[in-house]
Amino acid sequence: MNIRNFCIIAHIDHGKSTLADRLLEITKTLREDEIKEQVLDSMDLEREKGITIKMHPVRMEYKDYILNLIDTPGHVDFTYEVSRSLKAVEGAILLIDATQGIEAQTISNLYLALENNLVIIPVINKIDLPNAEIERVESQIRELIGNVKVSRISAKYGWGVEELIERIINEVPSPKTNSDKLKALIFDAIYDDYLGVIPYIRVFDGEIRPKMKILFKSTSREYEVLEVGYFHPNGRIKKDKLSSGEIGYVVANIREIREARVGDTIVDARYPQTIAIEGFREIKPMIYAGIYPINPSEFEELRKAIEKLSLNDASLVYIPENSPALGPGFRMGFLGLLHLEIFKERIKREYDLDIVITIPNVEYEVILTNEEKVFINNPKDFPDYYEKAFEPYVLLKIITPSEYLGNLITLLQNRRGIQRNLFYLDSKTVEMEYEIPLYEVIFDLFDKVKSLSRGYASMDYEFIGFKEGDLVRVDIYVANEKVDALSFVVPRIKAYEVSKNIVEKLRSLIPRQLFEVKIQASIGKRVIASERIPPLRKDVTAKCYGGDITRKRKLLERQKEGKKRMKMIGRVEVPSEVFLEVMKIENK
Amino acid sequence: MKGFYIHIPFCKVKCLYCDFYKIIPKSSFEIDNFLRVLSMEIHENSCYYNTIFIGGGTPNILDRNKLIELFEVIVKNIKLYENYEWTIELNPELVNLDNLVIFKDYGINRLSLGIQSLDDYELKFMGRLHRKRDVFKKIDLIERLGFENVNVDIIFGGYFQDVGKFRKTLYEIVNFPITHISTYLLTIEDGTPFKKLNIKLKDEDTIEEMFKMKEEILYEHGFYRYEISNYAKKGFQCKHNLIYWKRESYIGVGPSAASFIKPNIRYKNVENLGLYLEDYKKYREYEFLNDEQILLEKIYLSLRLDEGLELQDISIVSDLTEFFNIYGNRIKPNIKGIMVLDRLAIEIFQRINSRETLKLSSL
């Protein structure tokens, strides 16, 4: 069997999905009339945000070859998933928009691909556009990966796509086999209401077939295979087996998504000693946030919705918690802010629930005065007195055009970053490596880096451990009521500045009430920042619109509806977005 | 009590703040067409009423013949009880001896004059066609013809308006031979030129100051507030408007006119002359109010009226006392409360609605 496994590395909007559509069409995997725009991204949300979160693999047949395409997500929150899908293929199409040139974010994934020894096929897309700068983009590519052949295509019109397929066949190596004992990599998994968890796998060695007993290396759990098969854009196609080199799925009566972890290795249960594929990592949440229904009576519905969503998302972690200010809710762990954002949107869209999301935070390791060590993922639980406190640090990598270096160095210094490495990738591109508290990264560092580099820099980070810090908990009071959901932990030296910003932001976000509202930030009993929201003085429509009583009633009804989206804190009505919005200012 | 409203949707020009339905007539023919269809609608509502109110638009844009044509239809179809009130709205620049005489002949006993301000700069700013001088002349004419029940409308609170000029205007109008004054805080409505021009109101302090000043001057001269924006001499409260505000039944005819049939049917004619002429019944929009909607209407309307709102359990507003004067179980908003009345209405609605056992005693 002639197999070619490959993926596409591309920046958002560089035409990855359009190219995928053309490939499906030319290989007759789909008829022309079956192709909707962007077939491979199936979640609405992904389409809207222009990003791919979940990968949707597809198998195509062309001449005598089987072509397996795996899609890759393109955001730092999902770097681990990207690295696992790259592990599953032998080649990568590096797709660059002829009008945009190489975007720095693509470089990160390109390096990941090079680390995995993938064959890179550079492709310039959108050559049909009048503002295409083919020569310039070609020289950019050559500067990055040397003197290689660069394909020029228009995915939109299909120009050059058949030739590209020929290149994939000729240049991407066919998969190699080292043994006849089963070894397969899980690079994704989905949950199906009837079949349970379905891991997506790449078979490296041996074969997998129904009735076979298999073992997952990381959990040492055994399963019996019920079904295997491959992917078609219209659904799964059953097969009698998957052999070395193939990409497909396994159904094995797996109940929970956590049992099938991305990056884990599946082996034949008769040979449990088979060595696992390297690179497996437990996915741990990087940030935490409280999630509460606006209406406490919707707690049960929220619980069901979270349970449902986590069936399909192994990285969602949640435990129930209770907030004096917000009522019953959950503390949840996320991979990053985008992950949180996606969660929020899905809860709203798929379950029509209005929720409050508190300021996200990192996890702290604290040695209490009695020497006991605790992990704290809710700022309100951070103790007033402790022996030592540790916060998570990451190694942050930024790749940027050199002209923005100065800006970025200043930014990272302000964020308590420590430079670990700095070197030129080429005459114009610098890679910076910083050790920096995760706390400083999670809020808006990505946006800041982007804006300071006019969008050219890309960043990536990995957790490196906990480091001691002089940390302190700041509490927020609204109209003298402590709002535990707004408590946060900061380095003592930043407490004043951050508190001032938060209190100011709250003043601008909370609408005026019938009464004056005082907002305070305090450490223990000491108030360190304070603002007041003056009472509402005018809210009246003078005229009654003659006999049109309905009109004014409707006006009031609209205001009434608006109030339903507010959370009551004491007698203060706080719009639900406030809790999440407030963090956007926290790190100036 | 039962009221009858007639909407004349024509104006010579459109005032920059106004969002009532009106058009500038393209021809006399268009007005004739309108009167023909309006007559049909009036005829269909033949009945006894307590009040008639002809509003607009600018009702006195109609010339002598058209006025007579309209009034003939009215008197043939609309029967009035004793002690009736029949009002017509007038733009000062179009008031003349001719039409005043006709009003008198047909039995119109209340005039409502849209003067808005007695400052020529402000009048010009708002796009009004009359000037201060016209008002004095027309008021004089009206008095000489023996109209004893006259209202004037004024507008305040726009940033282009001035506290001093407002005081001057007030002192001048209280000495007019009139019985009623409507004082409207300028509202910037969607779709009006003022909205597009981003016209602002005065700051809240100034508005409150203007409100207090107005209240003082008007009370001094015997005009008492009986609705949030309306003041009258004793016995001269507008019966027709009270029908709206006390949720009595009324019928409105003409494009955009609203009707209410107790206890819960509201309908409204289409705000489009063409469609109205084509088939006014077809384009009517009906509404059948549920209990919550009725409650909300009662609360917001009662709070605007001098008699206030009677609560079964006064304790539900115990934290809001700074906004009300309280008489037993009855609450009446004070000036501070009037300034935020929309918010208070919603607040009280929610509190009553959230306790099913509590109902308005007036329900």
Image: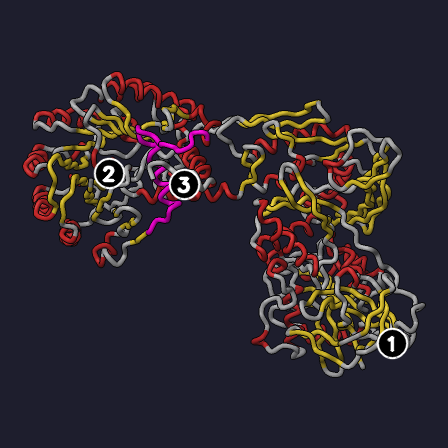
**Residue A332: percent from left, percent from top:** 71, 48
The CA span between labels 1 and 2 is: 88 Å
Q: Mark 3 sits on what residue?
A: A556
How many neighbours does mark 1 have within 10 angstroms: few (below 14), some (14-19), or many (20 or more)? some
- Residue that protrudes farthest toward the front in the picture: B357
Q: Mark 1 sits on what residue?
A: A206
Instruction: Look at the image and give the residue range highlighted in magenta.
Output: B288-315
Quadrant in the rendering for residue B241: top left
Asked if residue A443 shows in the view, the reply is: yes
- Residue that protrudes farthest toward the bottom in the picture: A64
Asked if residue A136 shows in the view, the reply is: no
* Residues indicated by labels 3 and 2 sit on the same polypeptide chain: no
Q: Which amino acid does the dot numbered 3 rest on?
A: Leu
Q: How many marks?
A: 3
Image: B243 above or below A111: above
Quadrant in the rendering for residue B167: top left
Q: Earlier in the sequence, mark 3 or mark 1?
A: 1
Residue B204 magenta: no
Quadrant in the rendering for residue A436: top right
* Residues indicated by labels 3 and 1 sit on the same polypeptide chain: yes
The CA span between labels 3 and 1 is: 70 Å
Q: Is residue A517 left or right of residue B333?
A: right
Closest to the camera, between mark 3 and mark 2, is: 2
Q: Mark 2 sits on what residue?
A: B243
**Residue A546: percent from left, percent from top:** 27, 39
